[in-house]
Image: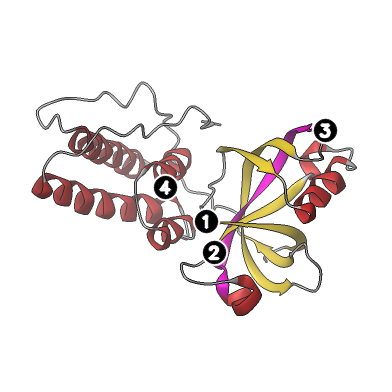
Amino acid sequence: MLVSSRIPLFPLNTILVPGLVLPLHIFEPRYRLMIQELLEISDEEQREFGIVAVRDGHDISTNGIEALHPVGTSTILREANIHEDGRYDVVTTGSRRFRITSLDSSAPLLRAEVEWLPEPETAQTEQLALLTHKTLQDFSAYRIALSGELNGEFSLFEEFPTDPTVVSFLLTAAILLPTAERQELLAAHDTPSRLTLIRTLLKRETGLITQLGALPAVDLLPSNASLN
């Protein structure tokens, strides 16, 4: 049975995945108010709001809930530094996935009824370990193609965790993809499904890059990524 909650929403033109650190600069009055409300909550783990991506070419004021992708990720407010003019610099950490069931846009600050989407428990089998290993190998080939060093090697296995779910979310954030495809990865039912789709996308992207020629190197592991 899915559990529902009502949370404030912060729509962005990006997708957050569980476990990653997201710094934000808060300047709009409605989001300043949201931060103020969250800071009044004594339990840090309850200082939660939703990050959800806006569909390309859509506007919330015109399209309402249809402007938003249905699945987002909540994030926990960890740090907040206020400027003299009331702006905030905050640090948040992606927490858990949700699906929007209804949207309240009657006030400047959007709020939504959401159903939480816990990641299904996945048995740590040899098959899943092999899938994770092959996915990381595919990512290594993709990263080499991006660097233009087609005969080079990257050792990803020392810098990446081994937990399949963590790997699946990190790669969801790391691969350069259109928002709709990254959204599909975020919304995948479970870890094996997400890893399988990641492999498909990596093979496609690596093939395209190889055919088009070398591209500039891209840092695919930003320093604000949390491997928890």
The residue positioned farthest toward the top in the image shown: 158
Q: Nearer the viewer, residue 57 or 148?
A: 57
Q: Quadrant of residue 156?
A: top left
Where disc 2 sits, the SS reads: loop
In the drawing, what numbered circle is on residue 13? 1
Quadrant for the N terminus, please. Answer: bottom right
**Residue bearing mark 3:** 84
| Amino acid type shown at disc 3 | Glu
Q: How is the image coloured?
A: secondary structure
**Residue bearing mark 4:** 172
Task: Give the foreground label among 4 and 2.
Answer: 2
Q: Earlier in the sequence, mark 1 or mark 4?
A: 1
| Amino acid type shown at disc 4 | Thr
Q: Give the crowd class for mark 3: few <14, some 14-19, many >=20 residues within 10 Å.
A: few
In the shown orientation, is residue 89 left or right of residue 169?
right
Rendered location of residue 176, percent (x, y):
34, 47
Q: Nearer the viewer, residue 89 or 132?
A: 89
Q: Is residue 79 magenta?
A: yes
Where disc 1 sits, the SS reads: loop
Marks 2 & 3, CB-CB < 8 Å contact: no
| Amino acid type shown at disc 1 | Asn
